[in-house]
Structures are given as C-alpha cells and as structure tokens.
C-alpha cells in the first residue's frame, strides 16, 4: 500500500510512517525523574498561586482540601503535558511511572506518622497511583498529539 500526496508527490510506504511504535524512544529513567521533578514543580507553582489568591483569609477545611486535591490532580496532567511537549521523541510511559512513584512518595508519610488517616494502604496506592498515572499519561498523550508526534488512534 502506497500513499501519495498530490501537492509534492511524496511517496510514503507503511514502514516509513511516523507512529508511536517507530518514534518511541527506549524507556528512560532520566525522563522518569524529569517527570517527577515536573510534578513537584507544577505543584509548587499551583500551590503558591492557590495560597496567594484562593486560600487567602478564612476558608472552610473542605474548600482547602478541594483546592489541594485539584492541585495534586492538575499537576499530574500538566506535568505529563510538559514532558510530552518538550521531549524530542514520544514519551508516554515515563510520566505515568513517575506519577506512580510520586504517589508512593506522598503515601510514604504514613510510614512515619502514628495517625490512622495517614497510614499507607495498598488500596490507597493502587487507586491514587493509578489515577495519577492515568492523568500523567493523558497529559503526555495530549502534548504528543498537540506536537503531531502521535495520532489519535496511537493511544498505546
């Protein structure tokens, strides 16, 4: 099967098409740690914004938890988006792995505190880590789509 364009008469065979499979770089721990740092950086920036503009003055505890949750979830998507945007090749798995590691780091607080609310639980890790990884993957995929490195049917 050959694809021919009419404007410049370029012929592209199936093996030459840019897809996720032939544009994806090998797994890189460097990009995992860059993603991890990106999540922390985005959380820091969003936290400063929320502290200065959204949480200034008296607010209920529920509103504060809602803002904190939104910052956490938003940072995974935005951090994944930044990695997908700035990486020279397709990076989808690295932000997802970094999000799982970030969730593990957050839940590790429970190893050092006596309160039951902060205790580490495998259910918390699976649910929180899975959601964080999904958001980071979605952010990276959105950026890769935005830059034209993947198509909508190249989700995996």
Image: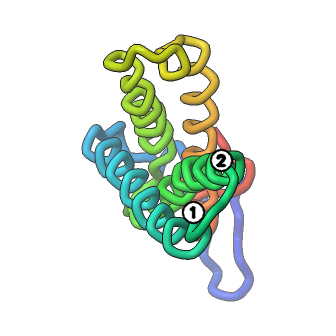
Q: Position of residue 143 (x, y in %)?
A: 57, 63
Q: Position of residue 28 (x, y in %)?
A: 30, 40
Residue identified by numbered label 1: 143
Q: Position of residue 150 (x, y in %)?
A: 60, 57
Label 1 neighbourhood size at 10 Å, few (<14), some (14-19), many (20+)? many
Label 2 neighbourhood size at 10 Å, few (<14), some (14-19), many (20+)? few
Residue identified by numbered label 2: 61
Q: Is residue 126 visible?
A: yes
Closer to the chain start, of discs 1 and 2, is 2
Q: Nearer the viewer, residue 71 or 91?
A: 71
Question: At 32% from the left edge and 19% from the top edge, which residue is drawn?
Answer: 112
Placement of 146 over or under 122, stated as above or below: below
Q: Position of residue 141 (x, y in %)?
A: 60, 53
Question: At 62% from the left edge and 38% from the top edge, which residue is drawn?
Answer: 134
Q: Is residue 17 visible?
A: no
Placement of 2 over or under 133, stated as above or below: below
Indicate the secondary structure of the residue bearing disc 2: helix
């Amino acid at each position: 099967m050959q694809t021919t364009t009419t404007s410049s008469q370029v012929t592209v065979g199936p093996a030459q098409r840019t897809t996720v499979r032939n544009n994806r770089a090998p797994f890189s721990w460097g990009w995992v740690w860059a993603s991890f740092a990106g999540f922390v950086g985005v959380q820091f920036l969003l936290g400063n914004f929320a502290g200065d503009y959204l949480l200034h003055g008296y607010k209920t505890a529920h509103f504060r938890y809602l803002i904190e949750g939104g910052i956490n979830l938003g940072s995974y998507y935005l951090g994944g988006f930044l990695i997908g945007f700035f990486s020279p090749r397709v990076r989808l798995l690295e932000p997802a792995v970094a999000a799982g590691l970030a969730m593990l780091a957050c839940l590790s607080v429970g190893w050092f505190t006596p309160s039951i609310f902060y205790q580490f639980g495998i259910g918390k890790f699976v649910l929180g880590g899975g959601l964080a990884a999904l958001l980071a993957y979605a952010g990276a995929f959105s950026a890769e789509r935005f830059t034209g490195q993947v198509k909508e049917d190249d989700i995996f």
